[in-house]
Amino acid sequence: MENTMIKGRGAYEGVMEGEALVLPDSVQGWAGLDEKTGIIIEEANSKFGAYIGGKILILPCAKGSNGWASHFYSASVAGHKPIAWVIEKLDSRCAACIVELGIPAVVETETEACKIIHDGDYIRVDGNKGTVEILKRAE
């Protein structure tokens, strides 16, 4: 069986493989992400209680204020850094976060990545080629 491939635009170079955490509601920075623990604390979020560290984050877009990126940066400094990004719609908040964290990123995906990729899928993000490949589906 052939792996599912999602095409987009490479926004930060590098290639990373790992487990996906899909955030279909995105997540607020302030009052949404605990910077000290890397845990989503936004109670209305479908991923409340999820940990972002060591995961490939799949998001439709940023959510909240212009300080969104700084909260992910602070979590990263505290040791809770995601390993790559897949973002369906790029805006200035996402762009700032991508650069601040310096991890591979694919943006402006041709299909809705949040609907195709599932939590726990093992995926490869190629920021050089602008592709996301689902290597193994979560069980």
Image: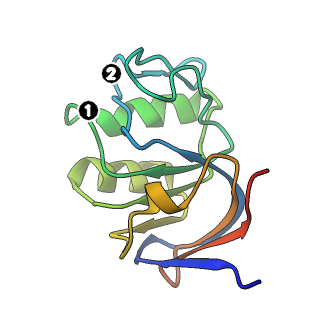
SS for callout 1: loop
Nearest to the eye among marks 1 and 2: give it: 2
Work out whether 54 lies above or below 44.
below
Q: Which residue is mark 2?
A: 30
How crowded is the residue under tag 1: few (<14 C-alpha within 10 Å), some, or many (20+)? some
Q: Residue at x 35, y 28 (%)?
A: 29
The percent coordinates of residue 78 (x first, y second) are 60, 26
Circles 1, 2 touching at the beta carbon (< 8 Å): yes
SS for callout 2: loop
Q: Residue at x 63, y 46 (%)?
A: 119
Q: Which mark is residue 39?
A: none
Compare residues 41 and 96 and report the one nearer the observer. Answer: 41
How crowded is the residue under tag 2: few (<14 C-alpha within 10 Å), some, or many (20+)? some
Compare residues 73 and 133 and report the one nearer the observer. Answer: 133
The percent coordinates of residue 65 (x first, y second) are 20, 31
Q: Quadrant of the N terminus?
A: bottom right
Picture quadrant where residue 112 is located: bottom left
The percent coordinates of residue 134 (x first, y second) are 66, 69
Q: Residue at x 45, y 54 (%)?
A: 114
The percent coordinates of residue 73 (x first, y second) are 46, 37
Q: Which mark is residue 67?
A: 1
- Looking at the rendered structure, the kind of residue marked 2 is Trp
Q: Residue at x 31, y 35 (%)?
A: 68
Picture quadrant where residue 51 is located: top right
Q: Is residue 57 left or right of residue 63?
A: right
Dot placed on the residue nearer the N-terminal end, 1 or 2? 2
Work out whether 2 lies above or below 57.
below
| Label total for image | 2
- Looking at the rendered structure, the kind of residue marked 1 is Gly
Compare residues 67 and 85 and report the one nearer the observer. Answer: 85
Work out whether 13 lies above or below 114.
below
